[in-house]
Image (spheres, rainbow, N blue to C red):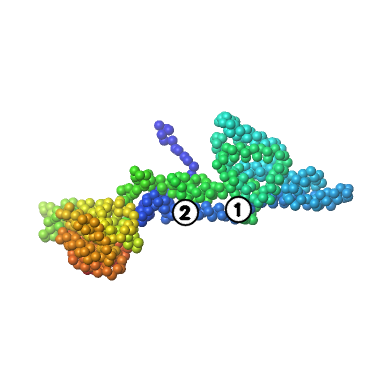
Amino acid sequence: MADRHRSRYRRYAGGDPLAPPVDLAEALEHIGEDVMAGYTPERALQEFLRRGGQDRRGLDELARDVARKRQELLQRHSLDGTLNEVRELLDSAVLEERKELARDAMMDDSDRAFRELQLENLPASTAAAVTELSSYDWRSPQARADYEKIKDLLGREVLDQRFKGMKQALENATDEDRAAVNEMLSDLNDLLDKRRLGTDTQEDFEEFMAQHGDFFPENPQNLDELMDALAQRSAAAQRMLNSMSPEQRQELMELSAQAFGSPELMEGLNRLDANLQALRPGEDWGGSEQFGGDEGLGLGDGTGVLQDLAELDDLAEQLSQSYGGARMDDVDLDKLARQLGDQAAVDARTLQELERALRDSGYLKRTSDGNLRLSPKAMRQLGKALLRDVATRLSGRQGQRDLRQAGAAGELSGSSREWAYGDTEPWDIPRTVLNAVRRKAADGDTSGRLFEMQDIEVMETEARTQAAVALLVDTSFSMAMDGRWVPMKRTALALHQLITSRFRGDHLKLIGFGRYAEEMEIEELTALDAMWAKGTNLHHALLLANRHFRKHPNAQPVLLVVTDGEPTSHLEPDGEVYFAYPPHPLTIAYSVRELDNAGRLGAQTTFFRLGDDPGLARFVDQMAKRVDGRVVAPELDDLGAAVVGSYLGSRGGAGRSPVADDLGFGGFGGFGGWYGGNRGFWVG
């Protein structure tokens, strides 16, 4: 029982511990917009991760930070730091020796002259000068100490190239410390030789770590982890050499032979490099970089910078997500934190959680062909967001009438009012009893009557007629060409969400019409690619709408047509599509005939005209007059509010609805007669 309640801890990963979870609504809204614009859900998800959220850096910004740091490293540093440090120590040693020779009065003049000649004629090459002075008998103790520092520095630098931190760890090292390094190198190479032969065991590794583990603060758990760390640094050291000029490289190789004053160290390191190259050939052993700064780097620090550059290159590839099967989980958060700081890792981890949540929450589903699709759950969420936007626009309109209708035949609206003569609505019993109790208590009424007429309240109802709604949306190439593609889809999705969630008794049919017309499910319309075939077949769309109306004879027909062009195609009797531009009179006649049929079925018709084409305006005005319909000419960002408002106002004069109140529409009865918008207007 105690184990069940045991607390579990993990390392704090940074960020605000009280921050809310990832915002799926924001992500879904952006992804839905891109899907409606023609992106696949997979690409739309990638684009959102690239852009990031409102308060969150995306992959592109993180990648820019990676590229910026890489450029800064290259522009700040140069690779001659060790050479310069050795030259400074050499110059100091020679200067101190010359001072000592000048001060030493007891010294033989011929010996002094010979020594001064040696110092005067040292080679210009730092490496050659250090080599020539290796057998020089220093008279100055300070000069001898400076010269010995060169050998010590070189030894620590070449070790720091392969084992991070050695330069500092071996400062002021004793002979015993150097012997321990050589022993570690020998044992390490023996262990790697066993790996090359396939005879190593975990016990061999553990025995090696038990003896030499202090040299490896990374605390590797097996030989593979140890080799990975060593190979990455060794490969970076090789890339550093490759990045030097030939003169720098030659001088450094000659100097390295002086490390610790013994060739044993370099022999062990060369053997280590050979083993690592054989065991980890996949590392970048041949690359190079172009440094152009003034800040000199020592061998160990230079190797560290080359490792940083390699990590930055890895991060750039991971953040690009441009390879097959890329996932946000591929991003190495530890590397990102090392290179860009903890906040960058927090941002990337949030994107990882966001991608995982979107895939696992049911918003994105994978089809049988392996592609991602927006699920019905995602479509509902998108529809709710769009409907809220529509509600905001409608609630801000001026001049809408607040009408109330109450009748016995209808649905309860949730409100009540005082009874009036002629009312047939059911009594609101709780409110009536409460009114009577309050009145009796206030008036001190002791009569035996339970109620007075003034106590009675009735429940308001509203007329709710069924509607058969046909939303006809133009899918011709001009809609996509003129930027009307996404607003059209947003409008359809908002209306679909309103009807399926709040007016479930209504019957909605979505019909897209380009060169020909077709009935569509909302998922199909939302994911529909731009259709570049020429033609606007209003005739075919009206045929399908009238078929929908006839299937629901007891419902109020509502016809909503969104278009930006005159009809240019129609269906021939044999089912073939006829196209002509300018519009053929027969195309116009066929379209008018079907509109008249819709009028005879009692359809309340609204045309939503997009664009300023005078020919379209004249055509739409005349069509609307034939069926006593209306014309709305909204701007694109107002299209959704216009269509939803017209639908609400066409539902049999329902008046104010609690549904509309919940959405923030306010009274919408006025929409039955006119569209009170700042950007749109009624004509016809």
Q: Is residue 303 above or below residue 227?
A: below
Q: Please name the residue shown 33% across and 58% down the image.
A: 532
The image shows residue 417 at horizontal and vertical percentages of 18, 58
Image quadrant in which you'd find residue 233: top right
Along the line of sight, the residue nearer the viewer: 103 or 496: 496
Along the line of sight, the residue nearer the viewer: 356 or 41: 41
Secondary structure beneath disc 1?
loop
Q: Is residue 229 visible?
A: no
Q: Give the total number of marks visible in the rendering.
A: 2
Q: Nearer the viewer, mark 2 or mark 1?
A: 1
> Mark 2, residues whose alpha carbon is within 10 Å: few (<14), some, or many (≥20)?
some
**Of callouts 2 and 1, which one flags the residue occurring earlier in the amino acid sequence?**
2
Secondary structure beneath disc 2?
helix
Numbered circle sitting on residue 290: 1
* Pointer 2 residue: 60
Quadrant for the C terminus in the image:
bottom left
Q: Is residue 271 visible?
A: yes
Query: What amino acid type is highlighted by mark number 1?
Result: Gln
Query: What amino acid type is highlighted by mark number 2?
Result: Asp
Q: Is residue 73 above or below residue 215?
A: below
Q: Please name the residue shown 67% across and 48% down the image.
A: 249
Numbered circle sitting on residue 160: none
Give left or right: position of 229 versus 59: right
The image shows residue 653 at horizontal and vertical percentages of 18, 60
Q: Please name the residue shown 18% across and 51% down the image.
A: 430
Disc 2 from disc 1: Cα separation = 25 Å
Give left or right: position of 458 versus 303: left
